[in-house]
Image (cartoon, helix red, strand yellow):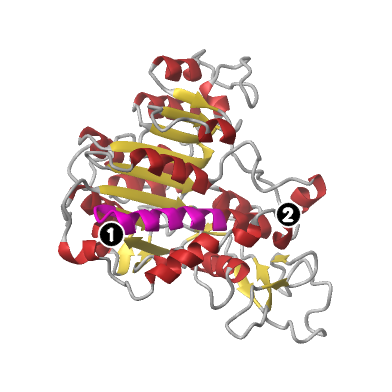
């Protein structure tokens, strides 16, 4: 599948480009330098599995060597170092536990460490989202995967094992977030009960869809239903797929079966972000939003370059919305970070000028045997650079799993002042805490 043939990609970077142009000459927003009045809010966006190398590939594919993404408009930057207590890299659930509690987790943690809910860096035995909720702030989670996925689930649920999806979503619903959007309808319905996207898998007989409605939630199942909701709709639960909202397959399977990267009934990451912002803007006590783009991680694990980068540019569109909101609201902190570099995606033009070294069509593997992704055997071409040249390149993969290197945390707003130099993963929590509560944690 050619990335350049996916629908809508020509306009994918337009919002980011406008935003970047507005950001020139504005390296430090006034909110960082002068303090703020009014409610404090925070947005944490976690494009899972995206190291600096994946951001580079996204930049080359969509805006070119001299273009800039919305991610590039975030003025505060730090190198992110994220070991767990028992590994040099994070798992998604360990990383989320660190982000949600501000403490170093173990690789198998999911809101628990050694079977106990940890005492957070704030001194309270609750996640940052629970603490924000207790302070009267509106809270929301959204995920391109299931609502049991740890990137958002850990902020509202604590379980001994990540695989216990039924218990995770039970706790998410019991926590009563104002808005929860994602996939995983199967985990909300009993075995044998058919939902909008397939059969339920709960073995305890509970129908959480009906429980959510009884608790005052409006439940929606498609992009169209979500976008049709009036602004005055109260609590909202979106269940947009049986499991993930994307098609988790490799490039060959996606091409052979004619599958799109994302399922058409589901809203994209940026659409969910826009929906939440519209309803949280002006919240009297502020708000806390956590979003996890899981497709950038799972699709890179499949070494599916076109789909991974389509997910990445969708995450960048969500970042553009958050940055624009931070420029309107000096009390808003936006932090963007990933806890792992999944599969080691890299862009290169190496040997493209020497057909004897790299013949056409391009091979499926490099000389050392690692997977190579191209545009159906031809190099990808960047959008024009500053001299009008479109530069050929191809993509290589190092593995199909998480690694520890090349991670970057970026941000804007009051809490983002903590992003400087090289930071531990626990600093993400502290930056968000500062943004939400105007309090530094040492």
On the image, the x and y values in percent for residue 265 come to 63, 36
User: Residue 93, position in %: x, y?
Assistant: 43, 44
Q: Residues within 10 Å of mark 2 (few under 14, many from 20)?
A: many
Q: Position of residue 145 (x, y in %)?
A: 54, 40
Residue highlighted by disc 1: 413
Asked if residue 345 lies in the magenta stretch, the reply is: no
Which secondary structure, mark 2?
helix
Q: Are marks 1 and 2 in contact (CB under 8 Å)?
A: no
Q: Which residue is mark 2?
A: 251
| Secondary structure of residue under mark 1 | loop
- In the rendered image, is residue 393 in sight? yes
Direction from residue 437 to residue 129 in the image, left or right: right
Q: Determine the image quadrant of residue 392.
A: bottom right
Query: Is 286 on the left-hand or right-hand side of 55?
Result: left
The residue range painted magenta reads 313-332
Q: Does 13 sit above or below residue 7?
A: below
- First in sequence, mark 1 or 2: give its number: 2
Q: Main secondary structure of the magenta part?
A: helix
Describe residue 384's horizontal placement relative to residue 91 as left or right: right
Closer to us: 329 or 109:
329
User: Going by the image, does 296 lie left or right of 106?
Assistant: right
Q: Is residue 357 above or below residue 126?
A: below
Residue 339: horizontal and vertical position, in percent? 43, 55
């Amino acid at each position: 599948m050619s990335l350049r043939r996916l629908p809508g990609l020509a306009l994918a970077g337009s919002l980011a480009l406008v935003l970047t142009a507005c950001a020139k000459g504005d390296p430090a927003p006034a909110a960082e330098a002068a303090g703020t009045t009014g409610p404090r809010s925070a947005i944490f966006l976690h494009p899972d599995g995206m190291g600096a190398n994946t951001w580079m590939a996204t930049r080359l594919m969509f805006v070119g060597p001299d273009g800039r993404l919305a991610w590039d408009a975030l003025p505060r930057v730090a190198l992110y170092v994220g070991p767990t207590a028992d590994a040099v890299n994070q798992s998604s659930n360990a990383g989320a536990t660190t982000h949600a509690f501000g403490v170093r987790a173990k690789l198998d943690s999911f809101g628990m460490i050694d079977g106990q809910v940890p005492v957070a860096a704030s001194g309270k035995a609750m996640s940052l989202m629970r603490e924000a909720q207790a302070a009267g702030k509106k809270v929301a989670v959204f995920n391109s995967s299931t609502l049991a996925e740890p990137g958002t689930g850990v902020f509202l649920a604590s379980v001994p094992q990540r695989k216990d999806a039924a218990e995770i979503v039970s706790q998410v619903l019991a926590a009563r977030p104002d808005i929860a959007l994602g996939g995983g309808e199967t985990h909300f319905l009993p075995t044998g009960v058919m939902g909008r996207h397939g059969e339920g898998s709960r073995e305890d007989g509970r129908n959480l869809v009906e429980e959510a409605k009884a608790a005052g939630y409006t439940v929606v199942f498609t992009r169209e239903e979500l976008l049709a909701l009036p602004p005055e709709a109260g609590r909202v639960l979106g269940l947009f797929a049986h499991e993930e909202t994307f098609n988790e397959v490799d490039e060959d399977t996606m091409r052979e079966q004619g599958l799109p990267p994302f399922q058409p009934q589901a809203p994209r990451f940026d659409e969910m972000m826009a929906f939440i912002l519209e309803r949280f803007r002006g919240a009297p006590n502020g708000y806390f939003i956590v979003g996890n783009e899981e497709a950038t991680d799972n699709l890179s694990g499949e070494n599916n370059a076109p789909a991974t980068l389509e997910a990445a540019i969708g995450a960048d569109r969500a970042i553009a919305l958050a940055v624009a909101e931070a420029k309107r609201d000096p009390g808003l902190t936006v932090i963007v970070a990933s806890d792992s570099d999944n599969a080691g995606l890299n862009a290169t033009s190496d040997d493209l000028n020497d057909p004897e070294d790299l013949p056409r069509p391009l091979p499926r593997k490099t000389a050392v045997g690692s997977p190579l992704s191209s545009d159906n055997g031809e190099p990808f071409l960047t959008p024009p650079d500053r001299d009008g040249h479109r530069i050929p390149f191809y993509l290589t993969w190092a593995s199909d799993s998480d690694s520890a290197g090349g991670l970057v945390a970026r941000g804007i707003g009051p809490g983002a002042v903590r992003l400087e130099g090289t930071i531990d993963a626990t600093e993400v929590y502290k930056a968000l805490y500062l943004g939400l509560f105007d309090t530094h944690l040492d």
